[in-house]
């Protein structure tokens, strides 16, 4: 085992309070596309065209077609070894898990004390803000090519279960505020002994700022990621590798 991995494994074993922050890299081995790496979603699409309220206002069918495609991809994915190690850590008192991912694979792996900063691709909310709380809908799927087009497509889009208006994916888009309760919980989780980021390019805020806040509060900070990130030079230990390979080693000091 590399010295850095051993050092981190020992720090994890000794830590009383651990906070883990994950990004798309932790789900890569499960087959969920990442955003910015090789074959990432933002290589094929422009985020402003799909992951913003403006894009949805302009063309809800296009945005729903993209989310339907991602839901279908994710439906066939299972949590991988990295999710299971993190779920194991989450059962330790004082451990909290924060994810940027919307795939809910941490939920399916049985992770406790999970903060889903960007929401869930399996949940919907009312585009017209009628007051209906977000709800889970795993059944809705895109009507399929050729079956509907144009105005017809808009009629087959998901509707709000309360007012019948247009429903939207209950995820946080660029330019949208995160749920203040989630931000508060994430900041509270920066009070920890060990802060570990796994599988994130560390460019999306406010999630990307958490590791720096944890360091400011005295935490031992570490990163496991396939590529270098803007956080790599700021953490105490930065391990280059695949989460599904490295995390099981970190769990067996
Ligand atoms: C907000 C939607 C304010 C859901 C997403 C401060 C500074 C700079 C910019 C900003 C700032 N504050 C706000 C901004 C703007 C913006 C932002 O951060 N822009 C960036 C891009 C510059 N932030 C926002 O707009 C946020 N909102 O701050 O609002 C506000 C306040 C009040 C009132 C109104 C507004 C909202 C951010 C959320 C955006 N939504 N997605 C969806 O459809 O998924 S973000 C999107 O990127 C995903 O949700 C994803 O979670 C997130 C981060 O990406 P990563 O998870 O890191 O994935 P990525 O592919 O980038 O990286 C994967 C990494 O894994 C790679 O490094 C790769 O090397 C590695 N990897 C691959 N395989 C493996 C691996 N590692 C290990 N093992 C492997 N096997
Ligand atoms: Zn409604």
Image (cartoon, helix red, strand yellow):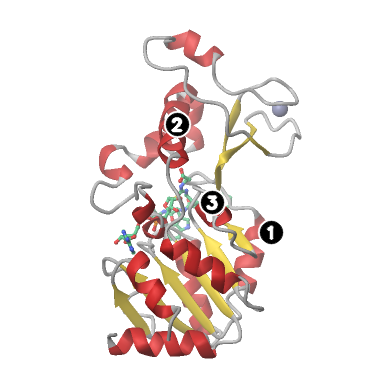
Task: Characterize the local packing of mark 3: few (<14), some (14-19) or many (20 or more) Cα atoms within 10 angstroms.
Answer: many
In this rendering, is residue 176 above or below 231? Answer: above
Determine the CA span between mark 3 and mark 2.
17 Å
Q: Nearer the viewer, residue 184 or 249?
A: 249
Ligand 2 picture quarter: top right
**To which residue does mark 3 refer?**
118
Residue sitting at 34 percent across and 50 percent down? 34
Residue sitting at 38 percent across and 62 percent down? 200
Quadrant where the image shows the C terminus: bottom left
Quadrant where the image shows the N terminus: bottom left
Q: Nearer the viewer, residue 233 or 91?
A: 91
**To which residue does mark 1 refer?**
181
In this rendering, is residue 250 above or below 81? Answer: below
**Element type at mark 3:** loop
**Element type at mark 1:** helix
Sequence-wise, the earlier of marks 1 and 2 is 2
Residue sitting at 60 percent across and 67 percent down? 186
Q: Is residue 213 left or right of residue 144?
A: right
Task: Characterize the local packing of mark 1: few (<14), some (14-19) or many (20 or more) Cα atoms within 10 angstroms.
Answer: few
Determine contact: label 3, label 2, CB under 8 Å.
no
Sequence-wise, the earlier of marks 3 and 1 is 3
**To which residue does mark 2 refer?**
55
Determine the CA span between mark 3 and mark 1.
12 Å
Residue sitting at 43 percent across and 11 percent down? 150
Determine the CA span between mark 1 and mark 2.
26 Å
Ligand 1 within 8 angstroms of badge 3 C-beta: yes
Which residue of the protein is positioned furthest toward the left in this rendering? 38
């Amino acid at each position: 085992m590399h010295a850095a991995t051993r050092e981190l494994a020992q720090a994890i074993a000794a830590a009383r309070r651990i906070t883990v922050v994950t990004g798309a890299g932790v789900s890569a081995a499960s087959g969920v596309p990442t955003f910015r790496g090789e074959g990432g979603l933002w290589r094929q699409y422009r985020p402003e065209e799909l992951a913003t309220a403006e894009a949805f206002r302009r063309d809800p069918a296009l945005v729903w077609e993209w989310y339907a495609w991602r839901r279908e991809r994710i439906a066939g994915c299972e949590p991988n070894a990295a999710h299971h190690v993190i779920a194991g850590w989450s059962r330790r008192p004082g451990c909290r898990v924060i994810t940027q991912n919307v795939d809910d694979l941490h939920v399916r792996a049985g992770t406790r004390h999970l903060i889903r900063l960007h929401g869930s691709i399996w949940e919907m909310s009312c585009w017209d803000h009628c007051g209906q709380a977000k709800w889970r809908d795993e059944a809705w799927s895109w009507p399929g090519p050729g079956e509907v087009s144009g105005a017809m497509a808009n009629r087959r889009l998901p509707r709000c279960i309360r007012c019948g208006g247009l429903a939207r994916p209950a995820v946080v888009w660029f330019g949208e505020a995160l749920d203040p309760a989630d931000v508060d919980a994430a900041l509270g989780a920066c009070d920890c002994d060990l802060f570990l980021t796994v599988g994130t390019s560390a460019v999306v805020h406010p999630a990307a700022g958490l590791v720096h806040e944890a360091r400011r509060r005295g935490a031992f900070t570490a990163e496991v990621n396939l590529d270098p990130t803007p956080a790599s030079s700021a953490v105490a230990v930065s391990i280059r590798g695949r989460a599904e390979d490295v995390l099981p080693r970190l769990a067996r000091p």
